[in-house]
Image (spheres, helix red, strand yellow):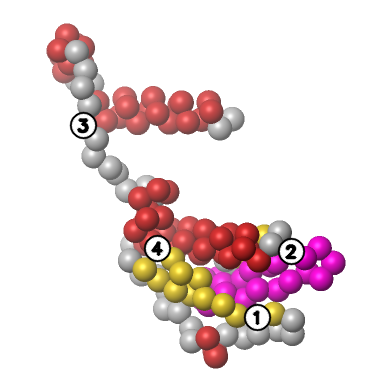
Amino acid sequence: MKLTYPAIFYKDEDTGAYAVEVPDLPGCATGGDTLADAILMGIDAASGWVLTELEEGRPAPAASALDEVPLESGGFVSLLALDMDAYAEKYGDKAVRKNLTIPAWLNTFAESNHVNFSQVLQDSLTKLYQQQHA
């Protein structure tokens, strides 16, 4: 699913950094040191906001027309293009099926002990992820 949302960009004249607000997504705001960074951060923030809505069973909000976006002095409006399929594939909570290969003796042991293969793999990968991001 591809979506577009208008975003408001404000440049801080002292630092040159940009603040970004996405008015159709309440509370969705971010920024970047350069305009390019601000655009990328805006896409990421908006994609995360919309993905949360979709994963909770709510529809993506409708986007306002560019001429309906309330703009304060010094700001400008541009569109953010979101590729929700790519974002969800990378960051979503949706379960993904994986095949694995293990020795037969380990499979026999696990099955005889009623091991949930998916849970063991998920727990192990989560622990590894937490160790590397601590």
- State the separation of the CA atoms marked 2 and 1: 14 Å
Q: In which image quadrant can residue 104 be found?
A: top left
Is disc 2 in contact with disc 3, using a CB cutoff of under 8 Å? no
Say which residue appears at 74% left-offset and 64% top-offset. Answer: 17
Q: In which image quadrant can residue 118 be found?
A: top left
Q: Which marked residue is nearer to the observer: mark 1 or mark 3?
A: 1
Q: Which marked residue is nearer to the observer: mark 2 or mark 3?
A: 2
Amino acid carrying mark 2 in the image: Ala
Q: Which element type, helix, strand or loop, lies under badge 2?
A: loop
Q: Position of residue 131 (x, y in %)?
A: 53, 26
Instruction: Report crowding for label 1: few under 14, some 14 to 19, many 20 or more residues within 10 A (C-alpha).
Output: some
- State the separation of the CA atoms marked 4 and 2: 25 Å
The residue labelled by disc 2 is: 17
- The relative height of residue 113 versus residue 99 in the rendered view (above or below) is above
Viewer-proximal residue among 41 and 92: 41
Is disc 3 in contact with disc 4, using a CB cutoff of under 8 Å? no
Locate the C terminus and report the quarter of the image it occupies: top right
Whichever of labels 2 and 1 marks the residue nearer the N terminus, that label is: 2
The residue labelled by disc 4 is: 83
- State the separation of the CA atoms marked 1 and 3: 49 Å
Whichever of labels 2 and 3 marks the residue nearer the N terminus, that label is: 2
- Read off the magenta span: 6-26
The residue labelled by disc 3 is: 99
Disc on res. 76: 1
Residue 55 in magenta? no
Amino acid carrying mark 3 in the image: Asn
Say which residue appears at 40% left-offset and 48% top-offset. Answer: 90
